[in-house]
Each structure stands twice: as structure tokens, then as C-alpha cells.
């Protein structure tokens, strides 16, 4: 597999993940969206600072919020 093919696969996976995130985001209530609007910049800052443990902690919080939204909106 060439480097270009690997990069394309990574871009496709990222696009799929982004689309999935957007799909779930549309199902959330306003409170959950506000919480995410606070957590996402923190996630970016931790990622840029190289704090993978902190970033993983935020990701777990985001997953919990998305899961709660799925349970409460259906």
C-alpha cells in the first residue's frame, strides 16, 4: 500500500468520524450542547499541549455526554 493510499484511508476515517459526531450532535439537547461547547476547546488545548491523559479524560466525558443524549432523546 502506498503512502498516498494510507493517507487517503486516514482522511476517510476522519471524515467518517466527523460525520458520526455531527449526527450525534444533532440529537443532543441544548444543555448537552453547551457542555460540549466548553469541553471541545479544552480537548484541543490538551491535544496541542501534548497532554494525552488529559485529552483522553475529556474524550471520555464527551462520550458520556453523547451517550446520555442518545438515551434521553429517544
Image (spheres, helix red, strand yellow):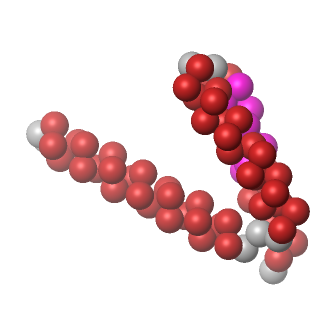
Q: Nearer the viewer, residue 34 or 24?
A: 34
Q: Nearer the viewer, residue 70 or 43?
A: 43
Left or right for 41, reference 29: left
Q: Which residue is found at the position 78% from the left and 46% from the top?
A: 38
Q: Nearer the viewer, residue 37 or 16?
A: 37
Residue 68 coordinates in the image, percent (x, y) = 83, 61
Residue 49 coordinates in the image, percent (x, y) = 59, 20
| Image quadrant assignment for residue 69 | bottom right
Residue 68 shows in this picture: no
> Does the magenta run of residues contain 33?
no
Toward the top, the furthest residue is 50
Q: Is residue 52 above or below residue 60?
A: above
> Does the magenta run of residues contain 59?
yes
Q: Which residue is found at the position 84% from the left and 68% from the top?
A: 30
Residue 21 shows in this picture: yes
Toward the left, the furthest residue is 2
Q: Is residue 10 above or below residue 49?
A: below
Left or right for 4, reference 33: left
Q: Which residues are magenta?
A: 54-63
Instruction: Indicate the quadrant containing the N terminus: top left, top right, bottom left or bottom right.
Output: top left
Q: Is residue 51 above or below residue 65?
A: above
Q: Which residue is found at the position 24% from the left and 50% from the top?
A: 8
Amino acid at each position: 500500500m502506498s503512502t498516498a493510499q494510507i493517507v487517503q484511508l486516514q482522511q476517510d476515517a476522519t471524515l467518517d468520524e466527523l460525520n458520526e459526531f455531527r449526527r450525534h450532535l444533532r440529537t443532543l439537547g441544548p444543555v448537552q450542547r453547551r457542555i460540549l461547547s466548553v469541553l471541545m476547546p479544552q480537548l484541543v488545548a490538551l491535544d496541542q499541549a501534548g497532554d494525552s491523559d488529559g485529552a483522553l479524560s475529556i474524550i471520555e466525558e464527551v462520550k458520556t455526554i453523547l451517550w446520555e443524549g442518545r438515551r434521553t432523546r429517544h
